[in-house]
Amino acid sequence: MSKGEVAMPLTVTGFCEFGMVVKLKAVCFLAVLHEIYHAYLDAQDGLPFNPETDLEPSHEYMMQHYTDDIAAALKTMFPSLDDATATALALGGYGDVQNINPTFWNTTLSNNHVTNAQVTHVNTYYENGSEGTLCH
Ligand SMILES: [Zn+2]
């Protein structure tokens, strides 16, 4: 794969069987998207941080640049998600930003018209899902 090119998952049907609710499935899909954006950042030159080692700055960058894209991808996969839920989901997976840079966190959430409670809830699912308890 050449630099800057990212393999998209052709199928997500293997994720989250057993009749789980859409939101949980979306979190599993989000976990895949999240890793793709990490890979995408790893392939970038000229970032003001090292995407392979600087996790929290990478997450801030992803929050700033990819929230709309991730929310749109979630809505494409799961049309029943409303905008606020898709956006809250898209901002999941960045619990380290919430802890390390709460000012950035709160500003970004506010810019995206979602509340801390909405996204924190998603992060709880996300962390469980990422650990594999929800996404087998
Ligand atoms: Zn990450």
Image: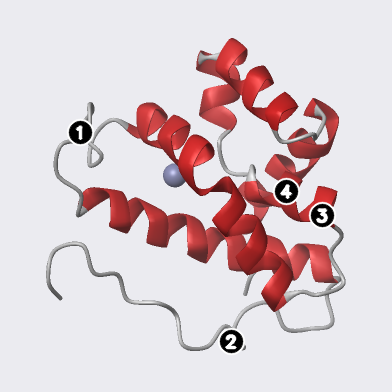
Percent from the top left, x then y, of residue 105? 61, 22
- Front label number (2 vs 3): 3
Percent from the top left, x then y, of residue 40? 30, 57
Give neighbour class at mark 1: few <14, some 14-19, many 20+ (Cα, 10 Å). some
Q: What residue do we see at 75% from left, 55% from top?
A: 86
The Cα atoms of the two marked residues, 4 and 2, are separated by 24 Å
Q: Which residue is mark 4?
A: 87
Q: Which SS class for mark 2?
A: loop
Give neighbour class at mark 3: few <14, some 14-19, many 20+ (Cα, 10 Å). some
Res. 18 visible in picture? yes
Choose the circle earlier in sequence order: 4 or 1. 1
Q: Nearer the viewer, residue 103 or 17?
A: 103
Q: How many marks?
A: 4
Q: Quadrant of the N terminus?
A: bottom left
The Cα atoms of the two marked residues, 1 and 3, are separated by 32 Å
Percent from the top left, x then y, of residue 94? 55, 36
Which amino acid, mark 2?
A: Gly
- Give yes or no for contact between labels 1 and 2 (Cβ–Cβ under 8 Å): no
